Image (cartoon, grey):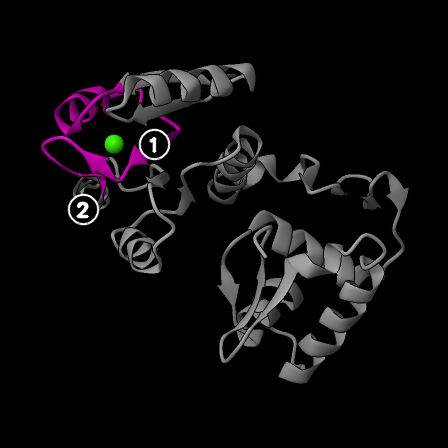
Amino acid sequence: MSRTVLLVEDEAPIREMLKFVLEQSGFNTVEAEDIDAAQRQICEPYPDLILLDWMLPGGSGVQLAKSLKQHEYTRDIPVIMLTAKGEEEDKIRGLDAGADDYVTKPFSPKELVARIKAVMRRVTPTTNEEPIEFNGLKLEPISHRVTANDEPVEMGPTEFKLLHFFMTQPERVYSREQLLDNVWGTNVYVEDRTVDVHIRRLRKAISTYSHDRMIQTVRGAGYRFSTKM
Ligand code: CA
């Protein structure tokens, strides 16, 4: 069944480009040019995801994101914000308002589709079995296979689980403790240091084509999987 993405963007050329890209990737699209139109379009059946522009006539996308997250019926619809500039403050405000991710303009269609799929995977774990790929690094959950530029990559089961977790939660920072909970499970007693050991092994395993650069250390916070350097 096709998923529906609601496109909230006032600039017609961008909206048309988004519609084209998404429909090429098998999504249905619904369009809205401002906040009023978006609110009219958000009704049953609810869209599976909302792509929300930051700057809109008659109010900002942040306001809309906030109000969606306050209502019981729309709270669970994932929102990806489109921001014009890559300003750190904007990103933080967007995520604070309840956006699930953000994409900075100008973006590549490929990256946008990857982000949409990643957010959908996060909210609907049933699709967790689909192969995931970033920059030529591919992980196939069903066969437990990892390839880098189509060449097989060997790694231990913990590194595989860690990589799987990272690839399904891109652009989010996780503390060592959160990684332990999510990858090792809450009933396992291991030291935080263990995370570092496995991160090191994972990086080494995927270093042939520099894919280890996507596993980033965030000082004082933990680790993040990111395609941005
Ligand atoms: Ca705009």
Within 10 Å of the Cα at label 1, are there few (<14), some (14-19), or many (20+) other Cα atoms? many
Residue type at mark 1? Ile
How crowded pointer 2 is (Cα within 10 Å; few <14, some 14-19, many 20+) is rated as few
71 drawn magenta: no
Element at label 1:
strand
Look at 35% across and 59% down and name the residue there: 88
Q: Position of residue 211 (x, y in %)?
A: 74, 54
Q: CA distance from mark 1 to mark 2?
A: 15 Å
Q: Secondary structure at mark 2?
A: helix
Name the image quarter holding residue 199.
Answer: bottom right
State which quadrant residue 73 falls in.
top left
Residue at left offset 18%, top offset 46%: 70
- Image quadrant of ligand 1 equals top left
Query: Which region of the structure is painted magenta?
Result: 32-61
Q: Nearer the viewer, residue 210 or 44?
A: 210
Single out the residue that lies furthest toward the left.
58
Instruction: Give the amino acid at mark 2.
Output: Gln
Q: Nearer the viewer, residue 229 or 29?
A: 229
Place of residue 160 in the rendered image (x, y in percent of width and height, measured from the top left): 76, 56
**Left or right relative to 218: residue 101:** left
Task: Give the label on residue 50, or none.
Answer: 1
Residue 70's label in the rendered image is: 2
Q: Nearer the viewer, residue 207 or 51?
A: 207
* Placement of 189 over or under 100, stated as above or below: below
Instruction: Return the disc, 1 or 2, that comes first in the chain's sequence.
Output: 1
Report x, y in % for residue 196: 69, 77
Dot in front, 1 or 2: 1
